[in-house]
Amino acid sequence: MRQLMLVLLFASTSVSFVNAQNTVSNHASFDALVTSYTKFRFTDAAKALTYATKAKELAILNGDNEQLALTSYYISMCQHNLDKNTMALQHIESAITQGAIVKDSLFLYKCFSLEGHILSELGEDSKALIAHLKAKELAENMEDHLYVIAPMINIAFIKKKHKDFQEAIDIYKSILIDVNKLNSKENKDHYSLVAFTNIADAYLWLEKTDDAEIYNNAGLNASSDTINPWAYYPLLMNKAIIFYQRTQYKECISLAKQIRDSTKLNNENLYLTSLFYLGKSAYHLNNYTETINYLEKAYAKMNASDDVDGNEKELHKYLALAYSKDQQPEKTVFHFQQYSALEKKQSIEDLKLNNETHELLDVSPLKTEIDTLGDELNKEIKNKKQYFILSIILLLLLLSSLLFYRIRVKSVKKKFKELLKKVSELENDQKQKIVSRKDAVSDENVNAILDKIDHFERTAYYLSTECNLSFMAEKLETNATYLSKVINRYKRKSFTAYITELRINTALVRLKNDTKLQSYTIKAIAEEFGFKRQETFSRAFKKHTGIHPSQYLKNLHKNDESVDES
């Protein structure tokens, strides 16, 4: 659900391969076979595959590498349209090999783009990302903005799919800038709608509802259900989700029903999404029977499809909760087990693709509780008489985990408020950057070093990743041993503790006031404040503040939103 690739859409057909094969003339030329392939490639994939296969046979007889590359691409395209992606991958790899021999950049660009789509269909998003990056590199060398935009959209889609929402948003926003360089108004309008739809969708995943509404309204104003329904209905679904996130559940239900009725026969993803939000909204209105009805319909559709649905995990969560309210313990346990299994699988895949380990700092305790519960449930499920008892235990565990989570959140909020007071003091108290001179300092050499330390702090040399004792001694034109003694005596701490404290205090102030900096990854923030390794920064931040960097950022965002609302 809510997965909006919107690039390189391929048609498929149900015409028999055997019947199509009987129509191919054994005496047709290569050009004639390609012409026949072109005629049927969007309307009858099976028939087009027959012509492409016959053309490849001639290419092999001719020993023509260019023909071999082209026909391998055609065959792969047809097999992809027919959902035969394993075979499609073999042929596109062959096309890439032959294309490298003939050195046709545009052809290779198309091959890597198709390979990326095939790999995504096969669940190989890491490899798909590499393919789209190769297509992007070829497009940049061709200096055609249109060719660059398509792989960028696909890269952003994969990022969004694996929960790297902020980076996906940044890519889509760059696409909105690049579309202005296109000559064709049709292309400008198309790719602008793609960007508007996906930016809104990504903001909704981040629960930044107001930001989502801005881009979603821009998309709705540029689309309609008759001219470009491929964008209009996803945008309309986004609007329903906006209602949901604002707890306007009745409005969400009304709009979701309209989308359900309009997409039931021609857009399975949107149809499933509408059922999903109908079920969730019904749950929040305490209509548990309706929740079960809507979500079970969605679950049946998911089971009948080979596609992976991004909301299946949450669907199991709401089904478990609804069945619990309806006192059906066996089904409650089943859906919580499904939820737990998907949580593990998706977390591993997302971490593998994005390599963003700082996200682990904010994992909800609910996940840990459900993971621990799994083995116990599997042992006790055999006795049906104990289902009701297990349901009660499950609910108690859930309530306990929620209570633990709230306690942790309150603790973090308390520490965050204390930090804000400290940051205010750091902002207002300029003495924190001046060396303490409470001790009488009669030594002129020491006085000179203390003045240089004062200047060193004001110029923020300590934010350099190369800043160590030798670096600072060189800047202050003194020797490291003497400088270390001065810092130990007059700063009353070791050199390492002194530099670390300066860096963390600076990070606290700048992160509070710089919204752009707040959007950086933890790794990038660490480097910004002089730390070579993300782990070192996180440990130092936690030691000095009592919370992780990601928790500080999360509370800053919430604080900014509450200020905006007031």
Image (spheres, rainbow, N blue to C red):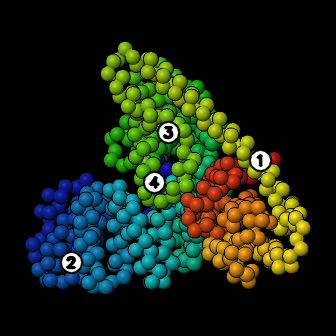
Give the residue type that dot 3 points to: Lys
Label 2: which residue? Answer: 68
What x and y, as percent, mark residue 466?
A: 62, 75
Q: Nearer the viewer, mark 1 or mark 2?
A: 1
In contact (CB < 8 Å): disc 2 and disc 3: no
Q: Quadrant of residue 19?
A: bottom left
In-image side of 505 versus 383 (left or right):
right
In contact (CB < 8 Å): disc 4 and disc 3: no
In contact (CB < 8 Å): disc 3 and disc 1: no
Q: Which mark is residue 367?
A: 3
In-image side of 371 versus 421 (left or right):
left
Task: Return the residue nearer the eye: 516 or 509.
Answer: 509
Mark 1 closeness class: few <14, some 14–19, many ≥20 residues within 10 Å: few
In the image, residue 136 sits, relative to residue 511, either above or below, namely below
Mark 4 closeness class: few <14, some 14–19, many ≥20 residues within 10 Å: some
Label 4: which residue? Answer: 350
Q: CA distance from mark 1 to mark 2?
A: 69 Å
Q: Residue furthest front?
A: 443
Secondary structure category for the residue under label 1: helix
Q: CA distance from mark 2 to mark 4?
A: 37 Å
Q: Nearer the viewer, mark 2 or mark 3?
A: 3
Label 1: which residue? Answer: 418
Give the residue type that dot 1 points to: Glu
